[in-house]
Amino acid sequence: MNVGLPPGTVFGSVCLQSRPSHDAFQSPLRGLERDEMRARIAAAAILCAAAAVGASYSALRGQDTSSAPHSVWDGVYTREQAERGHSLFGQHCAKCHGDALEGGDESPALVGAQFLSDWNELTVGDLFDRIRKSMPADNPGHLSREVSADILAYLLDANAFPAGQTELAHQTEILQQIRIESNKPESKNKK
Ligand code: HEC
């Protein structure tokens, strides 16, 4: 429930004023007046409680980020994106890193344990920038954000991270919120 007023301001002051002051009870009020005073305090207390509930409810909603992806295990790219990435990889990367990402003479593998341990606990945004800024090694800095994201989706697919419903974004800041975790988290094994 939302009472429509910022708690803390209007209700805050009502709540403070409605605290039964010492004087109110000590002063020789006549019966009727005292009853009216009690009724007002009770009404104010109900409003204060309502405001407090509203405030804590919106605080809870503000903190709810459970639907945002947190790691590469949450389905952060789509299958179509990975397929586009696969053919782009063939054009821009395979001559050094191999058709199956197995690596070449000078070029490291982009799948498997060594690759994953290099990137474990970094973010998808870090890997995105690494590709965008330093690859292809013989002509770096020319890949668009779209192309880099598609190729990155292919790398995630090749490393057996699950596909999902939403494509990888093209903004580093968004991708930086997705952690690379080489091991599948416990809680996701149940599915
Ligand atoms: C001309 C050869 C060449 C091409 C083409 C190339 N790379 Fe590389 N790549 C390398 C070499 C050499 C390294 C290791 C040295 C370095 O980091 O510069 C590397 C490193 C990397 C790394 C870091 C690997 C790790 O474990 O840290 C990634 C990721 C990567 N390349 C992705 C790509 C992608 C994606 C493409 C295609 C857009 C690409 N590379 C194209 C030669 C190449």
Image (cartoon, helix red, strand yellow):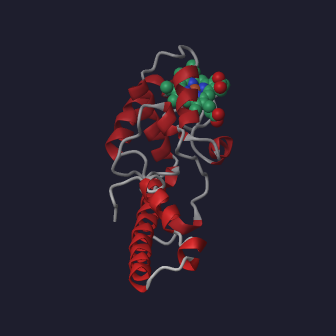
Give percent across and percent down for residue 60. 46, 61
Quadrant where the C terminus is found in the figure = bottom left
In the image shown, does 111 or 25 lie closer to the viewer?
25
**Figure label count:** 0
Quadrant in which residue 105 is drawn: top right
Give percent across and percent down for residue 24. 53, 73
Determine the residue positioned at 45% across, 31% down.
171
Drawn side of residue 137 relative to residue 144, left or right: right
Determine the residue positioned at 41% across, 40% down.
168
Quadrant where the N terminus is found in the figure = bottom left
Give percent across and percent down for residue 160. 49, 52
Give percent across and percent down for residue 186. 58, 67
In the image shown, does 112 or 58 lie closer to the viewer?
58
Position above or below: 21 against 122: below
Residue 96 visible, this orientation:
no
Toward the bottom, the furthest residue is 31
Position above or below: 147 against 40: above
Drawn side of residue 159 relative to residue 118, left or right: left
Q: Quadrant of ligand 1?
A: top right
Residue 137 visible, this orientation:
yes
Determine the residue positioned at 44% across, 39% down.
154
Position above or below: 38 against 150: below
Drawn side of residue 147 relative to residue 185, left or right: left
Quadrant in which residue 10 is drawn: bottom left
In the image shown, does 144 or 95 lie closer to the viewer?
144
